[in-house]
Image (cartoon, helix red, strand yellow):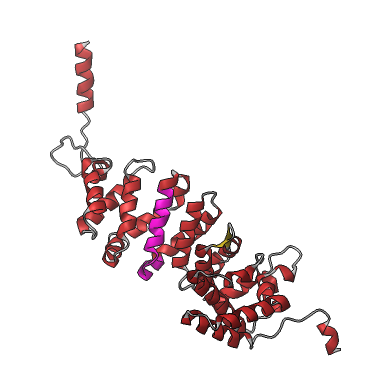
Amino acid sequence: MGARIKGIVGVLMAIPQKDPDETNPEWRITVNPAAELVGSPRLRALIDRLYHHQKLLTDFDAKQILSALQCMDPIAELLLPLLTVLSNATAYPSNQLLMREFRLTNRVVEMLPDSKHWPRSTRVILLQCIANMAVSSDNMDVMKLALNHIVSRLGSDDEMEIVVAMQALTNLSINIRKDQIQKFVPVIPHCLNRLWVRGEVNLNALRLLVNLSCCPDMVPYLLGNKSVSGLLRILDTDREEVLIRAVTWILCTTSAVDALNLTYDRISEHNLDPFHNLSLTLYYSIYGPKGREDLETQAKHLTNHSNKDVAGKSARLLEILANVPPFPTAGSHLNRL
């Protein structure tokens, strides 16, 4: 038996691992240095230091985090705290710069497609990390690669995941380019459907609607969508953080209607109702006979609001609304005969 084992060892050692250009053959062991980092006390110490004591990343920290993210398993114990410290670090512009330089931003975006199968907490914190990275306008070229995946998360069954996806899309929609419009169109019905949550205005949905309406080319798509019951009740609130955004949203939308000379004929192609019922559209809810009357009444009342921003935007809304032609009433075409 001993001779057999010795013979086998001899066979194994007769095939050394070496590079082709080596003149002196010898055993070489090739390992991934990052594999030693994952789950090691060194990585735990790094996470602890960044979470409790150190706010700004160093070049070495960025390299260590990138190495860990490149080989870490989604169910690894340390992935969640590592993404958490990375998400927290995005609060500092110098950290955002370092993350771009060392391609940490790219790596986080690359992880997003597969993350939909991850454990919930890790999946959500990765999305939060991307939402925070999207605050920096210098990250937009990298972030646009994640846009479709973020939009798809609006269909999640997890409330927190939807909230974080809306935060990410709000940051990404500050300056929508023409080539991005079709990617943002599917976001609209999600926002409108979630505008009211348990009788309260959903601020996350409203923030995103404001940004969408600030892009005039998005407004026809917005107005063609199905409206929500009691839409203009968003103007009847004591919450100033809601009111200022509600007025801003309708002001931006009305400004686009005026500037682009939008009528229902212009937006009818975007009506998503199977029977093209115009009375179900957002356009009709705002600019139809009853909606417009209610809007004018609300806006006039708000011109006396104690918040000068609310009062000023309400006055401006009334000015622009005067330029928007009244919605044709039933039988009005007969008057032209």
Does the magenta segment cover residue 27? no
- Per the rendered image, the range of residues in magenta is 122-141
Screen quadrant of the N terminus: top left
Does the magenta segment cover residue 125? yes
Image position, residue 57 (x, y; %): 23, 59
Compared with 276, 319 (above or below) is below
Compared with 150, 277 (above or below) is below
**201 or 161, nearer to the observer:** 201
Screen quadrant of the C terminus: bottom right
Q: Residue at x 23, y 26 (%)?
A: 12
Compared with 175, 110 (above or below) is above
**329 or 66, nearer to the observer:** 329
**118 or 11, nearer to the observer:** 118
Image position, residue 36 (x, y; %): 24, 41
Dominant secondary structure of the magenta stretch? Answer: helix
Residue 27: name its quadrant. Answer: top left
Q: Is residue 238 left or right of residue 257?
A: left
Q: Is residue 6 visible?
A: yes
Q: Residue at x 67, y 65 (%)?
A: 229
Q: Is residue 178 visible?
A: no
Q: Residue at x 21, y 59 (%)?
A: 59
Q: Residue at x 36, y 42 (%)?
A: 73
